Image (cartoon, rainbow, N blue to C red):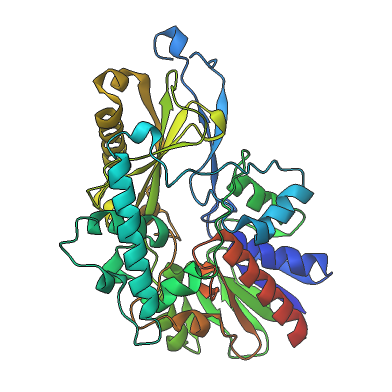
Amino acid sequence: MRTVVIGGGAAGIAAARRLHDAGAEVLLVEASGQLGGRARTWSLRLPDWSRGGEGRNGADTTIPVDAGCGWLHSAGRNPWTRIAERDGFTVDRSSPNWGRQWRDLGFPADEQRAFRTAWDRWDEAAHDALDGPDRPLSAFIADDDPWRPMLDAISGYANGAPLDAVSLHDWAAYEDAATDDNWALPAGYGTLVVHHAGPVPVRLNTPVTRINHRNRIIRLDTPAGPIEADRVILALPTTAYADIVFDPPLPDKQQAAADLPLGLADKVFIAVDGPEWPAHGHLTGNPHRACTASHRLSPFGRPIVESFFGGSCAGAMRTPQDATAFALDELVTLLGSDWRHRLRPLAATHWRTEPFIRGSYSHAKVGRADARARLAAPVDDRLFFAGEACSPHDFSTAHGAYATGIAAADAVRASG
């Protein structure tokens, strides 16, 4: 029995590796020219500041940065933590310090306490409503509450969308399962995910445009020619379902995918000449504005800032250059004008324009939290589905994607 896994992200790699290690015949096909999907590590060259703008770090110094997922969320139970340690990857257990503002710049201690009080009040109101009908997360804080902008900013980081677009029931499924241990990988999360593919047979640059599952043998149409399979695992971002023709049609699947849109989360990477903060520092750009970045200062002690935008704020950045300019302005406002010449843009993401992906991670529309189960359900024990959007409580994460890939692979084996 031959299985074809469509999609070379964390879920597809997990599924294909599971089947390969079990001795099954499996092929992993990926639409783009690289594995990893939304787990993607870039190698960036640092400037040589000592040469008048080219570094103190040496002209050939490069560092890995995660353009996509970068945190081992719920790290103690995250299977990627175990895989990393088994395969010799260093795991950094330092706190991300999201709840701390370096030197309280632009966010005094009394305001931080006031925000935590507002957060607790909102969180309690949301949980108190769980037994009722689904509602948007915005229903639990007034539009004119002074901390509404900050809550919207955090919703952008966590959900890729503002409060009014996110399902209460869906949010709670994740929130109540997550733990506070968020660790990181100096070599890059994307590096680990791609490494895990190991010996799995792979075809890159092979987008699947049509899936004919009328007959016993499933036919997959690609620009390089047809591929035949007995079983298929679709490990795709939800945006990709609209681009595939199913024969016979699967309107319920495509509707489930549409009910789980991908939000937006983007990053800007900036080199710093002589950082004055400790490793793993943090700054919120402006706690009184919904469109603000979360600035990660010197991850792993490296001389960079990683600025993170989410939700509507990320959507407002029309180009990577716009996001870069915004991040620089926020940092200079907090640090002082003399810092501008000490900051050098390196790179920025723009996931909405990424071919075959077009977004970051899924959130359920209000009233559509059941879409995750609908998307994950197999069809005729021949088509199986995986990906972070199929996870009941770890969606939007690489470990949620991994778990769904393993479940799909095990279901394939059981169906044979």
Q: In which quarter of the image is residue 117?
A: bottom left
Residue 401 visible: yes
> How many numbered badges does the structure rendering display?
0
Residue displayed at 31% across by 21% down: 339
368 and 107: which is toward the camera: 107
Q: Quadrant of residue 153?
A: bottom left
Counting from the top left corner in percent of width and height, residue 379 is at 59, 88
Counting from the top left corner in percent of width and height, residue 203 is at 64, 59
Residue displayed at 31% across by 37% down: 327
Residue displayed at 67% across by 89% down: 216
Residue displayed at 32% across by 46% down: 112
247 and 98: which is toward the camera: 98
Counting from the top left corner in percent of width and height, residue 359 is at 40, 59
Q: 343 above or below 106?
A: above
Quadrant in which the C terminus appears: bottom right
Counting from the top left corner in percent of width and height, residue 120 is at 36, 63
Q: Quadrant of residue 149?
A: bottom left
Residue 258 visible: no
Q: Residue furthest right?
A: 23
Q: 189 above or below 377?
A: above
